[in-house]
Amino acid sequence: MAIEVRNVSFSYSLDSAFETKVLDGVSFRLEHGENLGILGPTGSGKSTLIQLLNALLIPTQGEVLVDGLNTKDKKNGSKIRELVGVVFQYPENQFFEDKVYDEIAFGARNLKLSEEKVRERVLEAINFLELSADILQKSPFEISGGEKRKVAIASILVRKPKYLVLDEPFAGMDYPGTRALLSLFKNLKGKCSIIVVTHTLDELLGLVDKLLFLYKGRVKAFGDLRSLFDLDELREYVSLIELLSKLKKKGFSFRKSLVDMDSLEEDIVWNVLHGKV
Ligand SMILES: Nc1ncnc2c1ncn2[C@@H]1O[C@H](COP(=O)(O)OP(=O)(O)OP(=O)(O)O)[C@@H](O)[C@H]1O
Ligand SMILES: [Mg+2]
């Protein structure tokens, strides 16, 4: 059992003037039970790739197979979404129920389980995420940021996905919150495969077995974390990515795609000279 991505390309707005190829010839295979980390600069196609894994997006070319089920085949859609649970970035922005209980239960109810089974699963999920039961009657809008994130994750865990996909799950969280969440994810080992997009390398090291580097929509590297990657180089690259994201948020614009510290330095000088900051 595995997720197989075979020579996948993807373009948004296909056959229109706005067509943009975002992924180009992406291939990798993740066995069930293995955890995968996905790294790459802003705009490299990480979130797009994730949406291809649970058939929210369908490849323009190539194919994605989840335990042998092709995402292209419409009749596989609901089964694939049962197998692959996706927690999107800032998932708490999409809360819509009045009570935390219903927010978490929603995903399980979709599986057409009895209300008793739904309740069991909700309790199991909050237990696992170390949330106290009194949170269930609160409004999802009046709980803390860390609790919101956990509730959003619980709403996917109640579906007991075989593959749990997390798009930047630590975004906006403080260090202790990140560590706490990370250790919970580690407890999932053996129960489901985790596929996680994050730039916090140190968090990844204890969690994933494999790493996939996306760069401009292509796989720059894929393989076993410890045998294929030089950790010092990886650390430098990841700090570069983090720095880039921060600078972009502050209004920097980059004239070319950055691959190393030298071109970063050049572009910083350019931004300063052109009064961008
Ligand atoms: N719905 C969309 N329509 C058109 N283009 C899109 C759409 N979503 C994303 N893109 C473009 O596709 C490219 C890849 O975006 P994607 O969100 O997959 O990257 P990412 O690696 O997740 O980036 P980030 O680190 O900022 O989250 C970007 O150039 C983005 O502007
Ligand atoms: Mg993204």
Image: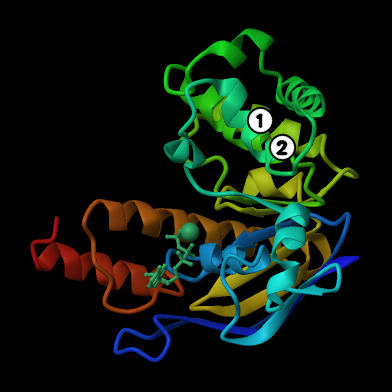
Whole-percent x and y of residue 203? 66, 43
Q: Determine whether, in the image, residue 23 is placed left or right of residue 277.
A: right
Which amino acid, mark 2? Ala
Q: Which residue is mark 2?
A: 108
Q: Is residue 190 above or below residue 4?
A: above
Say which residue appears at 40% left-offset and 54% top-offset.
243
Crowding at mark 1 (Cα within 10 Å: few <14, some 14-19, many 20+) = many
Secondary structure beneath dot 2 equals: helix
Camera-nearest residue between 86 and 82? 82
Say whether mark 2 is within 8 Å of ligand 2.
no
The residue under the point 64% across, 67% down is 55
Q: Are marks 1 and 2 in contact (CB under 8 Å)?
A: yes
Q: CA distance from mark 1 to mark 2?
A: 5 Å
Quadrant where the N terminus is found in the figure: bottom right
Q: Which residue is mark 1?
A: 105
The yes-or-no answer for disc 1 within 8 Å of ligand 2 is: no
Question: Does the rendering let one see residue 195?
Answer: yes
Identify the residue shown where x is 66% and y is 27%: 180
Crowd around label 2: few <14 · some 14–19 · many ≥20 (10 Å): many
As helix, strand or loop, the secondary structure at mark 1 comes to: helix
Disc 1 residue type (three-letter): Ala
Q: Count numbered badges in the picture.
A: 2
To which quarter of the image does residue 24 belong?
bottom right
